[in-house]
């Protein structure tokens, strides 16, 4: 529902997914799973948490403090960018409970980490901390404890300073780039350019550059 509101509001160009009380998310409630009520944790459109497979056009940044484990890690992986503090802990411990990371973890973790490291995390269930995740390229910005949300807001500001339609096309293509060949991705980029050529913002970008002023984007 939150993402639907973001998508429907023309004044919102980016969103941040975060937790509370020093925690991001520990994933699914095992009591709910053991009671056979797992359907409560999924939606038809978004799958786990109503988010991991939810179609969207606008970029979402994960701001991670503390544990992002199991489904919580999968929620973070479903975002376009991850900002984390040194308190963050990322893990997919499903194998420790006779489960698999079926809400996107198996597919997405090997795309953001070296294959052997992803395999180690998925097969042992052992987590890595925020510093390690940053060193390995899973996290794009690392902060001191308590600083993830502020850093994510600043990062969102950087995204919002760019042409929103161009950002959305770029984010959309990046989400599926691992599933496509170079030629397919190249064609997607050319298709995006054709759409952007017909936009008002395409005219505003060069005009603002010539006039030596910040561009005023409209998202149209």
Image (spheres, helix red, strand yellow):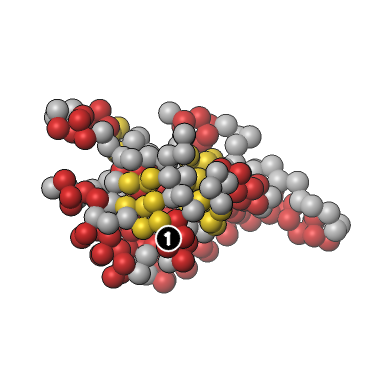
Residue 96 visible, this angle: yes
- Looking at this view, is 88 or 74 the one in front? 88
Q: Position of residue 43 (x, y in %)?
A: 30, 32
Q: For the residue carrying disc 1, how many other residues have a C-alpha within 10 Å: few (<14), some (14-19), or many (20+)?
A: many
Q: Position of residue 51 (x, y in %)?
A: 37, 39
- Looking at this view, is 27 or 67 the one in front? 67
Q: Position of residue 137 (x, y in %)?
A: 45, 64
Q: Residue at 46% of width from left, 49% of height from top? A: 87
Disc 1 designates what residue? 133
Q: Quadrant of residue 193?
A: bottom right
- Looking at this view, is 185 or 100 the one in front? 100
Q: Position of residue 208 (x, y in %)?
A: 80, 55
* Quadrant holding the C terminus: top right
Q: Residue at 31% of width from left, 43% of height from top? A: 71
* Quadrant holding the N terminus: top left
Label 1 secondary element: helix
> On the picture, is 38 further left or further right than 82?
left
Q: Quadrant of residue 114?
A: bottom left
Report the number of discs: 1
> On the picture, is 116 further left or further right than 200?
left
Q: Residue at 51% of width from left, 51% of height from top? A: 85
Q: Is residue 75 depicted above or below 126 in this figure?
A: above
Residue 168 visible, this angle: no
As drawn, the residue found furthest toward the right would be: 211
Q: Is residue 181 depicted above or below 127 in this figure?
A: below
Q: Is residue 96 depicted above or below 177 in this figure?
A: above
């Amino acid at each position: 529902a939150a993402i639907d509101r973001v998508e429907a509001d023309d004044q919102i160009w980016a969103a941040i997914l975060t937790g509370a009380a020093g925690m991001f998310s520990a994933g699914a409630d095992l009591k709910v799973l053991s009671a056979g009520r797992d359907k409560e944790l999924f939606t038809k459109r978004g799958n786990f948490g109503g988010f991991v497979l939810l179609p969207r056009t606008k970029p979402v940044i994960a701001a991670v403090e503390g544990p992002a484990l199991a489904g919580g890690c999968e929620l973070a992986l479903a975002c376009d960018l991850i900002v984390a503090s040194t308190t963050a802990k990322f893990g997919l411990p499903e194998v420790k409970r006779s489960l698999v990371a079926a809400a996107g973890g198996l597919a997405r973790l090997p795309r953001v980490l070296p294959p052997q490291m992803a395999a180690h995390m998925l097969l042992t269930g052992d987590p890595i901390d925020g510093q390690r995740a940053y060193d390995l390229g899973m996290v794009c910005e690392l902060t001191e404890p308590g600083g993830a949300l502020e850093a994510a807001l600043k990062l969102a500001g950087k995204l919002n300073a760019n042409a929103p339609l161009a950002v959305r096309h770029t984010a959309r293509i990046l989400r599926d780039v691992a599933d496509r060949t170079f030629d397919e991705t190249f064609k997607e980029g050319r298709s995006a350019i054709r759409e952007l050529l017909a936009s008002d913002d395409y005219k505003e970008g060069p005009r603002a550059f010539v006039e030596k002023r910040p561009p005023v984007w409209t998202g149209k």
